[in-house]
Amino acid sequence: MSATYRDALRAALLYLVLAVLWVSLSGFALNSFFDDSAEALHWQTINGYIWLLLSAGIIFIARTRLFRCLGIGAQLAERSADRERLRQAAAVFDCTREGVLVTNEKGLIVHVNRAFMQITGYQREEVMGQQPSLFKSGRHPASFYQAMFKTLNSVGEWSGEIWNRRKSGEIYPQWQTIRIVRDDDGRVSQYVAVFSDISAIKNSENVLTHLAHHDPLTDLPNRLLFTDRAEQALASAQTHKRGCALLMLDLDHFKMINDSLGHNVGDRLLKAVAARLQALFGPGITLARLGGDEFAVLSESCPQPGQAAALAQRIIDALKEPFGIDGHELFINASIGISLFPSDALSAEQLLRNADAALFKAKSSGRNGYALYTEELTAHAQQRVEIAFELRRALEQQELRVYYQPVHDLKTSRLIGVEALVRWQHPQRGLVSPAEFIPIAERTGLIAEIDAWVMQQACLQMCRWQQAGVVLSFVAVNVSSRLFARRELYQQVAQVLRDTGLDPAYLELEVTESAVMDDPEVALEQMHRLRELGIRLAIDDFGTGYSSLLRLKRLPVQKLKIDQGFVAGLPGDEDDAAIVRVIIALAQSMGMQVHAEGIEQVEQASFLLEHDCDLGQGYWFARPMPAAQLDWARAPHIG
Ligand code: C2E
Ligand code: MG
Ligand code: MG
């Protein structure tokens, strides 16, 4: 017999006993009722109360026992706990920030919460009895929903990102979890979908992706995105047998603008350049900023080198108009290197490298122009690597030589100083010009050793001349811009002076104008320290480096050397003549000596003499030569 039956039997028995007791007591009470003596009346009242109490007690106990036996009490307790749970669920359901949607087994909406209405913009009445397909964005293919229901039916739950449409028509991303609710028999009774609006997260994700792929100043694609697009364009060009062109563009002398007008103006100029170029291109052309003043252009359809060259020329022409920034009218030129797919390179990386090599060529052949990449450039690059390797050997094997070129006083024609110029006595190639190996030495760092060696040789030679009774005012030595920016230069010069014993007053250091103006503050400090050693300072190739007159005035320099490019045009070229006159006047006004180099004709020397230039150097006087060949008596007569 089961425990429930036993309990029921026990309850029934108890109920029976109690009922018998109740009946007998009721009988006793009724008997007393018909007896109307005073004592009987007293008992009648007491019995009435007892009967009443007992009846209530019996009913209560019996009911409790019976209910417990039938399990109704537990059900009631359970029901009240359920009610409590439902109240809690309803509160959560309504307060939660996630939208909740419940459908019946047929997929018709039977319930939505407050967040649902806030997110979707629909009111409860508008969606009741409708299908959730009402919210479809149209962004997912049918296969997406098929896969979703497949997972839902097999696992009972699906979670994922889904794009839906608000009542306003706007589509937005949701993170949604859908779950199947089954009844006791395992049949689907409801579908519950809980979702959150992730458009804010998506937006910030998009912002982050944008930042990672764009240059913050100009909002143009950065190197990463550009390379990626170039790879894609090349893949597509390969399939469609199309040609592409990659142009690398560098603004000429942009640093000068930054230095003289400040980074704010520089930044605004870069933005203006980006905007002007962007307006120039239609679809199929991507413009990117690779960094600093370097931009890149990818033309996805450019079959001929001529078309790429025309594009480069359009860019150069577009930049000719001045830019008005902060009340300044700024002129800026660009140099462009072009590399073509598939003739020059097959990968984006190689195209970029080749365009860079072509850009280097464009810059070194005078700027404000473009150059196409050629095989020759690779050959040159290889040659540079070889020269760098050989230069090391040249230093060890003492293949370098110092030549001296006389400098004359233009008024007296007297030889008053020399400039030391390095040469490389190559075992196979003969005498190699510094123009060929100095730039390579600068890039490989060998320049420090070369300049130190030349300075040592020049000072030793000057001491020898002095001992031999030759009267010279100075020996000039060139210092590379790479070395000039370094603090060690001061120690190096001091060391050479100590080692050779030369009086510092006879040593002149030539620094190019661009080296000084690249970082004028460092240059100023360096020059003051060098001056403390007692040596003389000259600015070489003056007129080519965009000097700021204000800065020039502050420099402790004793001499300006007019660049030979201006001397070459004398006396016929009016522009050159005007520039030379201005430089002479400038040097004089600042109390500096002025020295013209590259004098090849007597007319040039006469013009310079007429305009009060102090010193002259050039093939017309003498070429650079070994120390032993110098002719001290030579004083060519001007005019
Ligand atoms: P620079 O210092 O401006 O030297 C003047 C250059 O002009 C020399 O070329 C010289 O030979 C050349 N020159 C002199 N007179 C005439 C002339 O009448 N007509 C023409 N067309 N050219 C003339 P070089 O010796 O080939 O030197 C070229 C450059 O290489 C130098 O220009 C200088 O910047 C650099 N350099 C030479 N030696 C050294 C050195 O020891 N160290 C460093 N860092 N640079 C050096
Ligand atoms: Mg020089
Ligand atoms: Mg020079």
Image (cartoon, helix red, strand yellow):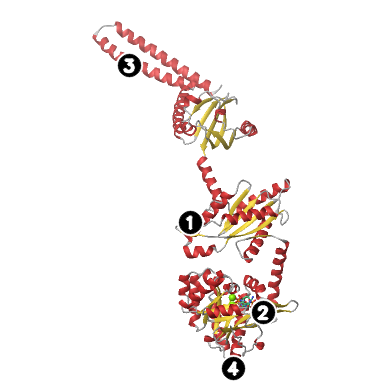
Quadrant for the C terminus in the image: bottom right
Q: Quadrant of residue 56?
A: top left
Looking at marks 1 and 3 on the same chain, the residue that comes earlier in the sequence is marked by: 3
Task: Name the residue beneath numbered marker 2.
Answer: 423
Name the amino acid, label 4: Gln
As helix, strand or loop, the secondary structure at mark 3 comes to: helix
Q: Position of residue 571 (x, y in %)?
A: 58, 74
> Within 8 Å of ligand 1, the CB of disc 3?
no
Name the amino acid, label 1: Gly
Mark toward the viewer: 1 or 3: 1
Mark toward the viewer: 2 or 3: 2
Marks 3/4: CA–CA distance:
150 Å
Badges 3 and 4: C-beta atoms under 8 Å apart?
no
Task: Name the residue beneath numbered marker 4.
Answer: 467
Q: Position of residue 371 (x, y in %)?
A: 66, 60
Q: Measured along the vertical axis of the image, is residue 103 above or below residue 628?
A: above
Task: Name the residue beneath numbered marker 3.
Answer: 50
As helix, strand or loop, the secondary structure at mark 1 comes to: strand
Q: Along the line of sight, which residue is nearer the eye, 551 or 323?
A: 323
Mark toward the viewer: 1 or 4: 1
Task: Name the residue beneath numbered marker 1.
Answer: 324
Q: Position of residue 483 (x, y in %)?
A: 57, 74
Q: Along the line of sight, which residue is nearer the eye, 519 or 433?
A: 433
Badges 4 and 2: C-beta atoms under 8 Å apart?
no
Residue closest to the far right: 428
Marks 2/3: CA–CA distance:
138 Å
Q: Measured along the vertical axis of the image, is residue 388 above or below residue 299?
A: below
Q: Quadrant of residue 442?
A: bottom right
Q: Measured along the vertical axis of the image, is residue 37 above or below residue 453?
A: above
> Within 8 Å of ligand 1, the CB of disc 2?
yes
